[in-house]
Amino acid sequence: MSSVRIECVAQEGYRVGESPVWDEKEGALLYVDITGRKVCRWSPVTRQAQAIPVDAPVSSVALRKSGDYVITLGTRFAALKWKEELVTTITQVDKDKANTRFNDGKVDPAGRYFAGTMAEEIRPAVLERHQGSLYTLFPDLSVVKHFDQVDISNGLDWSLDHRTFFYIDSLSYSVDAFDYDLQTGKIGNRRSIYKLEKEESIPDGMCIDTEGKLWVACYDGGRVIRLDPETGKRLQTVKLPVDKTTSCCFGGKDYSEMYVTSASDGMDKEWLSRQPQAGGIFKITGLEVKGVPPYPFAG
């Protein structure tokens, strides 16, 4: 094992940093601050983060084939033009619910944008249960709802052979797998592949590496864990200097660096004084494994 190095690259104290995505064209890391209501882009060259403010909680960001980005904003799928700082609504979900918002989202290998909802939180991870759903925005801009009764729709990714969809509903404390049909985007045959241990706390964002292993950020667990979805075994734990690790992705020019987002919401002064990097963006090097480049939305 080479030595794993962890560095806080953006110490901005984001409230709920989430949804890191490497933008190869810009050579930069995209992510959001959900409750801070901004979409951010950090450059490893300038080591600075730019931010675009938006008018609602923004929970995920994804690349778009035609250029710029798509985001989940409140209960809307929306388009974001970066230079113009322009947000336009594509479509809205959960119209029958007053108090939900989107949470994590990611684009599948066919260019469809999967994203799920949850009830607005009373405080972090405290909310009305079973209010969320999982949706897909298709390239023709139509929306399909896969299922409801979700607590906190969270991490998602696809197996390297594109036959399995991995998904986390945080308060089930489980990483689940579904059979996945690349042609249609349909999912089925849900099963649990890993149950989190007590000290790992709440499963949050997730990504896959080129060996087909899953990396899961553990909210309140201060770590990312590497799982083998075939055996259900945990292979590796990487601890971070903050408790509220929220999500992870691979990036850098050869996708050998891991970026981890974190949150500071729900932490009192004493807790923050012990973890001054809470809400920061972390870069992990030396993992000796690479990630899969993100897929762009095809619509």
Image: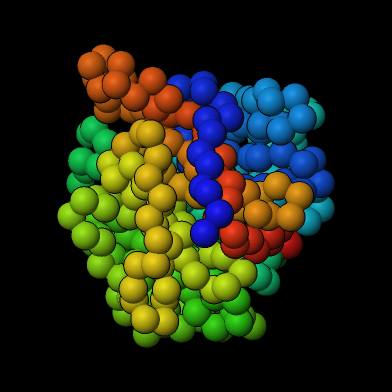
Closer-to-camera residue (76/67): 67
Residue 97, given in percent of the width and then of the height, sits at 33, 48
Count of numbered circles in the view: 0
What residue sits 51% from the left and 39% below the top? Answer: 6
Question: Quadrant of the image for the C terminus?
Answer: bottom right
Q: Is the residue 48 above or below the residue 29 in the image?
A: above
Q: Nearer the viewer, residue 159 or 104?
A: 159
Q: Is residue 80 left or right of residue 32?
A: right
User: Residue 271 in the image: x percent, y percent?
Assistant: 25, 22
- Along the line of sight, the residue nearer the viewer: 74 or 22: 22
Q: Depth check: give the residue in front, 242 or 5.
A: 5
Can the viewer see residue 97 in this picture?
Answer: no
- The colour scheme used here is rainbow
Residue 281, above or below 284: above
Residue at 24% x, 33% y: name it. Answer: 123
Residue visible at 45% across and 22% down in the picture: 13
Instruction: Please state the horizontal and vertical placement of residue 27, each as a whole percent of the image.
Output: 77, 41
* Residue 253 visible from this viewpoint: yes
Across and down, in percent, residue 200 comes to 26, 53
Residue appearing at x 60%, y 82% in the figure:
161
Quarter occupied by residue 256: bottom right
Drawn side of residue 217 relative to residue 109, left or right? left
